[in-house]
Image (tube, rainbow, N blue to C red):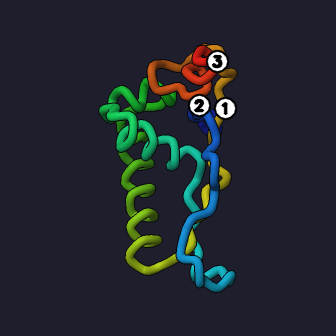
């Protein structure tokens, strides 16, 4: 029997989901696809300063899972920067939080922005 899918908590989608060189061609060989859950690990660890353990708690997965996601995400960022490829953020196994702080912690932008208004 297959193991049930465990969705990764993500607080918000990126404001922009496509990055790269302005003169890039539109063919598939010049693209790198980063999943939304990979984006979330980069946001939490590199931008928000979470440890991998804190990121795992926030996303509701094991620390080893976060480590694997994070390693893959950083490799895709490097490939985009070094090889001049377009980086697109789309897809993945994630569940968007409700913005009420349920299941989210200090790194939840939706929760934080809602209270600033």
Residue 110 x, y percent position in the rendering: 61, 26
Residue that badge 1 annotates = 96
Q: In this rendered view, identify the residue nearer to me: 104 or 2.
A: 104
Q: Residues within 10 Å of mark 3 (few under 14, many from 20)?
A: few
Residue that badge 2 annotates = 11
* Mark earlier in primary sequence (1, 3): 1
Image point (46%, 26%), residue name: 107
Secondary structure under the numbered disc 2 in the rendered image: loop
Quadrant the C terminus occupies? top right
Is the Cβ of the residue at disc 1 closer than 8 Å to that at disc 2?
A: yes
Image point (35%, 43%), residue name: 46
* Mark earlier in primary sequence (2, 3): 2
Secondary structure under the numbered disc 1 in the rendered image: strand
Apparent side of residue 101 relative to residue 82 in the rendered image (left or right): right
Residue that badge 3 annotates = 117
Image point (38%, 67%), residue name: 78
Q: In this rendered view, identify the residue nearer to me: 1 or 37.
A: 37
Residue 115 x, y percent position in the rendering: 60, 14
* Mark earlier in primary sequence (1, 2): 2
Question: Of the residues tagged 2 and 3, which is closer to the observer?
Answer: 3
Per the rendering, the mark at residue 80 is: none
Q: Is residue 7 above or below residue 77?
A: above
Dividing the picture into quadrants, the one containing residue 48 is top left
Q: Residues within 10 Å of mark 1 (few under 14, many from 20)?
A: some
Image point (65%, 80%), residue name: 28
Q: Is residue 56 above or below residue 114?
A: below
Q: In this rendered view, identify the residue nearer to me: 65 or 13.
A: 13
Q: Is residue 94 above or below residue 34?
A: above
Q: Residues within 10 Å of mark 2 (few under 14, many from 20)?
A: many
For marks 1 and 3, give the CA distance: 21 Å
Residue located farthest toward the front when viewing the structure as drawn: 117
């Amino acid at each position: 029997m297959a193991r049930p899918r465990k969705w990764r908590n993500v607080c918000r989608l990126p404001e922009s989901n496509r990055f790269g060189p302005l003169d890039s061609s539109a063919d598939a060989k010049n693209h790198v696809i980063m999943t939304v859950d990979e984006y979330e690990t980069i946001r939490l660890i590199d931008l928000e300063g979470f440890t991998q353990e804190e990121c795992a708690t926030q996303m509701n997965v094991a620390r080893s899972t976060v480590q694997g996601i994070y390693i893959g995400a950083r490799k895709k960022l490097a490939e985009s920067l070094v090889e001049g490829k377009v980086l697109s953020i789309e897809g993945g196994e994630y569940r968007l939080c409700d913005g009420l702080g349920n299941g989210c912690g200090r790194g939840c932008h939706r929760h934080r922005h809602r209270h600033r208004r």
